[in-house]
Amino acid sequence: MTATDLQRLDATDQADLIRRGRATAQEFVQASITEISRSNDRINAVVSTRFEKALREARNSTHAGQFAGVPTLVKDLGCGTAGDPMWCGNRVLKRKNHRAARDGAIAEALRAAGFIIVGRTNTAEFGATITTEPQATGACVNPWDPRLSAGGSSGGSAAAVAAGYVPIAHGTDASGSIRIPAAMCGVIGLKPTNGTLPLDAMDGNGWFGLSTPGLFGRTVRDVRNAFGAIRTSQPVMPEGVQTLRPDATNIALSVAVVRPTDRDTAAVMDQVVTTLTALGHTVEDTTPPFLEERHWRRDFLTLVGAGALADIRRWEQILDTQIYPDHLDDATASMAAVGSRASTSAVTRAVTGLQSYRDTVASWWGSTAGVDLIVTPVLAHPHAPLGWLSDPTEGSARIRQTMLYTAQFNMSGDPALALPLGTSAANLPIGIQFAAAHGREDILLHIATELERELPWSQRAPAFD
């Protein structure tokens, strides 16, 4: 098998071959290195590598952990890997070649599961926008079309999985930063229930609880198994709620569908609705009221601005250097300015608003007769040219017009999943979002398994050579 053949196996198959002695961890790590070396100069998904360390770890692998010997990548935002560069998409950190003193919590969890980290992926600066075009490390392009954005802020991880560098990668999501690039790059993106995966001290409180680590993958079983392997806490679910078994079948779900206006996305959604109905699920076209409420946006913007500013202030303390606005990309400077203008009382009100929103959404799930899932587009406009979302004059308005469906589930803290369920007329991936109540990743992964069987996507891959 070629390096490409090896890398197109999912993580579950890779781990199985290693466990049975049919392949070695070194082979899979070397295949990952080969694939990254072959095309990363064009895609720019990986901004720093640890190839020699990874090969040494592969040679010394004890085959402990469910994914022992399987290569992975982590986003260069939080998730430190001891001794390796950690730049967060920022020019000051890169100029100082800042390196992490220790492994972060998610890196520790990935290693405990047996994964071998081969490098760090490109990110929007400090995670402040939904396209990955930082001045510090350059734009990450979409493997399906290098003229297009890979999305953000976890664009490097999504592009790396789409390009076949690794089968599973780490990302973070405070407003859609996993689901958006997953949709643009044609892979699976899971934002779990906020608080389910651990944050590091460097992450503060994850922008007041908006942000969470999560995962990218190409197969549902990989995402399910990797999530199970690295999760460190179980969210408290309502009394009487039964968790679905991974192999559960013939479960009828009630699904609320929010219809898109984009023509290509609408065609994919029609196919999804037809498939869900044929599978025995009850589908209703309805928009839950909390998705369209207005007041949450003010609270969200306040918390994101204050969270971004707090991140910058933490880095100034660590580096003993002031990070001025002209050291920041336009989107980051704008977000930090929002945080600077927000008074302590405004932030307090926004935190109260966040909790109120979570209570409202939890009440909706509890009171709405039998609704198990909400299905929406991931994006109002599924693809964006490079520079379109980062434009210093028009970018902010374009982001607001594009990002209509994702941030609500950061506000609510509920789990949400992007699935690559179709393609546009131009043969670009279209992602559809599925959201469930607090702690119900099992429902998301159940419906994903059904749709993966009925509308398979794993054989679709970008031809970027």
Image (spheres, rainbow, N blue to C red):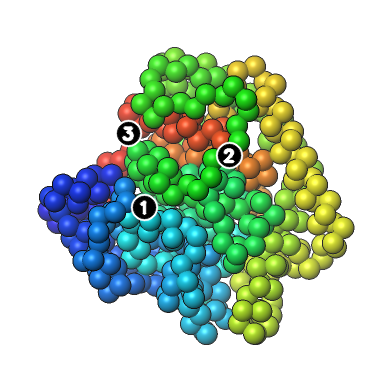
- Residue 369, placed above or below residue 266: above
Question: Horizontal and vertical percent for residue 415?
Answer: 56, 39
Residue under pointer 2: 235
The x and y percentages for residue 401 are 64, 47
How crowded pointer 1 is (Cα within 10 Å; few <14, some 14-19, many 20+) is rated as many
Q: Which residue is mark 3?
A: 456
Determine the residue positioned at 53% across, 70% down.
Answer: 88
In the image, what residue type sits under mark 1?
Ala
The residue pinned by badge 1 equals 113
The residue depicted at 42 percent of the width and 76 percent of the height is: 83
Report how far apart the C-alphas of labels 3 and 1 lie in the structure: 27 Å
- Residue at far right of view: 345
- Mark earlier in primary sequence (1, 2): 1
From the image, which quarter does the C terminus lie in? Answer: bottom left
Please indicate whether residue 223 sits to the left or right of residue 253 in the image.
left
Q: Nearer the viewer, residue 315 or 183?
A: 315
Left/right of residue 176 with respect to residue 443 in the rendered view:
right
Left or right: residue 208 versus residue 224 is: right
